[in-house]
Amino acid sequence: MSKPKVAFYWGASCGGCEEAVVDLAEDLLSVVERVDIAFWPVALDFKRADVEALADGELAASFINGSVRTSEQAEMAELLRRKSQVVIAFGSCAQLGGVPGLANLHSREAILECVYQEAPSLVNEERTVPQLATHVPEGRVTLPSLLDSVRTLDQTIEVDYYLPGCPPPVPLIGAAVTALVEGKLPARGAVLAPDVALCAECPRSATKPERLLVKGFHRTHEVVADPEVCLLAQGLLCLGPATRGGCGASCIGGNMPCTGCMGPTSRVLDYGAKALSAIGSLLDSNDEEEIAALAGEIVDPVGTFYRYSLPASLLHRRAEPASRAGGSSS
Amino acid sequence: MSREIVIDPITRLEGHGKIHVFLDDAGDVDRAYLQIPELRGFEKFAQGRRAEDMPQITSRICGVCPMAHHMAATKALDDLFKVDPPAAAKKIRELVYSAFMFEDHALHFFFLGGPDFLVGPAAPKAERNILGVIGRVGLEVGKEVIGVRQQLRALIGQTAGKVIHPVFGLPGGLSRPLDPELQQEFAAAAARAVEFGKFALGVFRDVVLRTPEFVEMVTAEAYTHRTYCMGLVDQADKVTFYEGTLRVVDPEGREFLRCDPREYLAHIAEHVEPWSYMKFTFLKEVGWKGFTDGMESGVYSVAPLARLNASEGMATSFAEEAYEELVSTLGGKPVHHTLANHWARIIELVYAAERMAELAADPEILDSQVRTLPTAVPVEGIGVVEAPRGTLIHHYCTDSRGLITRANLIVATQNNAARIAMSVDKAARALIKGGEVDDALLNQVEMAFRAYDPCLGCATHSLPGQMPLIIAIHDPGGGVVREIRRD
Amino acid sequence: MPEAELERRFDPRIVAFFCNWCTYTAADLAGISRMEYPPGVRIVRLMCSGRVDPQFVLAAFRHGADGVLIGGCHPGDCHYQEGNYKARRRFELLRMLLRDMGIEGERLRLEWISASEGDKVARVCNEMTEQIRALGPLRLRAAPPRAGRPSAREAAGEGAGEPVVEEPVGEAAR
Ligand code: SF4
Ligand code: SF4
Ligand code: SF4
Ligand code: FES
């Protein structure tokens, strides 16, 4: 019997998801032995044409990490979708947009301008900006275009499963591959991780008060955190209550608060709104001014609550400036 | 009729890469372009973020060397908040950083770029990977490479919170002290790493240096560029990764620049080309003269070989011996042969292991005092480290609340970008003649690239016979010319 | 000028989440008393302002609202005791978040309106409409459609794109 064919592909990725697979495979040769890797550009020498040559649905599964930022990435995702029975969005970039998804706070033009025209180290009198096509003396070279915003994988193609995390925890990757090979994947659409909040698996949860109220937030550089006590109870913005477990509370183990890379539990549509709600309800005051002051201590709400999920949020990206501000003019 | 060959994707570095080779009527190379077709814009979306989050945000630039970004950012925060971390914190940082440099260099030498040499550049593609390496050096070695990396990565993860995207860096120190048990484990792992490093040097000697054809290749003009070289050095002008003075030597090896790395803006500038999203850095005082080498061109290089050139050797004994050997074998400094980077990389790997051993044995590293709390109002901070792939600069400005108003990032590979582009072009010109393109030639073009910065090898995680491979080679029209199978 | 005319014709759409016990009753009263307020205000009745999940607010903006108004009982008057305070705490954070997302402060408003303050309902709605008219329509670019996540949501019985009420207003005595 032939082994199931699988593909790995990365979009706008940092490569950490690929490294996580490498970390897995060192332990799980037996699993890797049971699949036939048909495409893995980061590692194997197959090219796009090889994928095109496959029959539709010939791949048992494609694991795709990274968000979608360029036309090229969107095309590859579509191609792999056609060839695959199952597509797994791998890592928080593919699932929710990831850290680079914070780029949706800005327009593509503003990003290009910042990088190619404003950086203090630039010498660029001609104000050159990379072009989609450049005529060089020898011919024409092209670059893929940047999409208008950073997209999640499921804003690009249909996705069957999600492996959350930045990068996904190695044991969850192993479990997903095993489930795939053994035909034991759950219902389509599932997130392949425990569906409980991180606090439930956090070794510090016993020190988290039943009804926690916070009289002020500290920023991580302002205090030395007690290594045993719940970080939220110490006034550090730990997003454990709003975040899916499954990572073994790694950051807490590092004595740093959870920043939410595993994303929401099921039934939550918008991670940031949920996390904001969870944190908001801890503010220990009924006084309007005091509440405003406490809230004001969270100086970067978007970067805090949407660190990994801005593209997947209901708003998706920053609103454009209103065109008719102060409308009475003219 | 001019023809075009596209190698896409080639090995990766923070994103994807593409090489366009243009052939002229005679089938010779007109010019080869290396393109980086991606941009994520970290500099822009860093704006408005809390400064103290930068070590975790910027590590997402690269998941292969997240520790380098994490550390550069953390050091930039020290500078931003004007705090000097306690001695133990600095030592733990350097210990973990050395472990990271070691495992990254090991990955490259045995799995990624190294196989070109260890197996041979003209060997079939299916063998130019860890499987082939194991064929040459034995299964036990393969297992040891995997084992020592795994051990170190686990230790990094336990100390830093996560191995991919660490969390422990804070301005003025670390989020927690080093656990005594971990220190013991680090000491044991370091001893193993030192042995491994010596062994790796032996492999290089036996396999590469004793093969005249390889030595010839290393010193071939096709792989040689006479550029300036940059790196951090310690007080004795020895190579250092975590902290030091920025030093640049000219193509003749004379000291050209010595400065506090925080003065980088006075000396380093970036150039933009319309055909790549990657910016090219150059020495400001010399100027951008295009993709050309020599005294008159501001192009400089970084990473292992450049660091050796920019220094007066290594601070630890075995590494220093190996350094002397490299210099004398290749006819004195500076060494401009790109492929000697592989050799330099093992020398650095040995240094990283020896440094790890020194630090793990230092009793002060267990001190529980690992944080100095900042009191200053933040304004501006710069942090510089040597990443595996070269000098890495993070530079932040903030408002008085410590929110980033401007971030400037010069990543290691960018410092090498111009030289890499030149290497690819030069190698293509020398190797592709009369329209004849075969696998070995294309690989040698890629080798020019891989010597600086690798892709991840799939073969990293499998042992002989367990990984089926099918490799196809295409003609310019996209058709398959040849297929190599290994089921 | 045609531009100016267009402007005059812009009728902001405002989604108003009113609590059943105070503000909704006040809105009723305003209706009965024939106090005029703009037709662009669409009222959604909830049991308590504390039930306004931030996801509802974001969903309203996503689906075309130019402004969102939350109305609840005066401090101390909430039927569930703490609901309106809870709303206040979330509201502060949400407003900061929206500001950073390019959505002006005037587009989200929280008001305490008791059952007898029908006139306040009318005044607040009129005021807010005028303010938003001056700002212009909210220019939230369309998000790429969610191609995926097919069956899980259906399986869980969730309507596509509809926010799900997560936490009931808890601790209160009835
Ligand atoms: S999810 Fe995290 S580890 Fe994976 S590609 Fe994105 S940033 Fe990198
Ligand atoms: S809030 Fe954070 S530290 Fe506290 S129990 Fe939850 S995950 Fe653990
Ligand atoms: S603790 Fe939070 S941020 Fe850290 S790995 Fe777990 S889910 Fe991700
Ligand atoms: S019942 Fe009116 S605000 Fe709670």
Image (spheres, coloured by chain):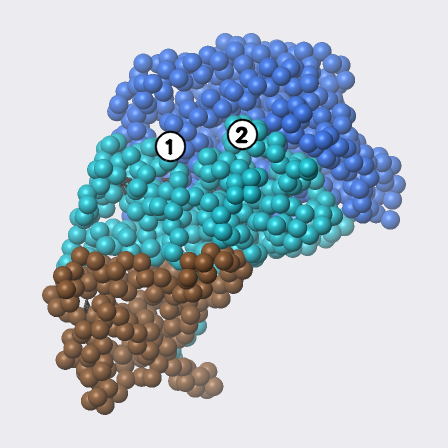
Judging from the image, what is the letter of the chain drawn in brown?
C
Q: Residue pushed farthest left?
A: C76
Mark closer to the observer (1, 2)? 2
> Which residue position holds label 2?
A28
Q: How many marks?
A: 2
Judging from the image, what is the letter of the chain drawn in cyan?
A
Residue type at mark 1?
Gly
Query: Toward the viewer: A211 or B325?
Result: A211
- Looking at the image, residue B211 sits to the left or right of residue A284; the answer is right
Percent of width and height locating residue B36:
62, 44
Judging from the image, what is the letter of the chain drawn in blue?
B
* C-alpha span from label 1 to label 2: 23 Å
Disc 1 CB within 8 Å of nearest ligand 3 atom: yes
Q: Is residue B383 above or below residue C131?
A: above
Residue at left offset 77%, top offset 43%: B5
**Local secondary structure at mark 1:** loop
- Looking at the image, residue C163 sits to the left or right of residue A288; the answer is right
- Looking at the image, residue B437 sits to the left or right of residue B121; the answer is right
Residue type at mark 2?
Leu
Residue at left offset 45%, top offset 58%: C155
From where the camera sits, is residue A187 visible? Answer: yes
Chain designation of label 2? A
Residue at left offset 26%, top offset 23%: B368
Which dot marks residue B161?
Answer: 1
Q: Is residue A24 above or below residue A85?
A: above
Query: Toward the viewer: A15 or B98?
Result: A15
Q: Is residue A73 above or below residue B337?
A: below
Percent of width and height locating residue C112:
18, 71
**Local secondary structure at mark 2:** loop
Chain designation of label 1? B
Residue at left offset 38%, top offset 60%: C101
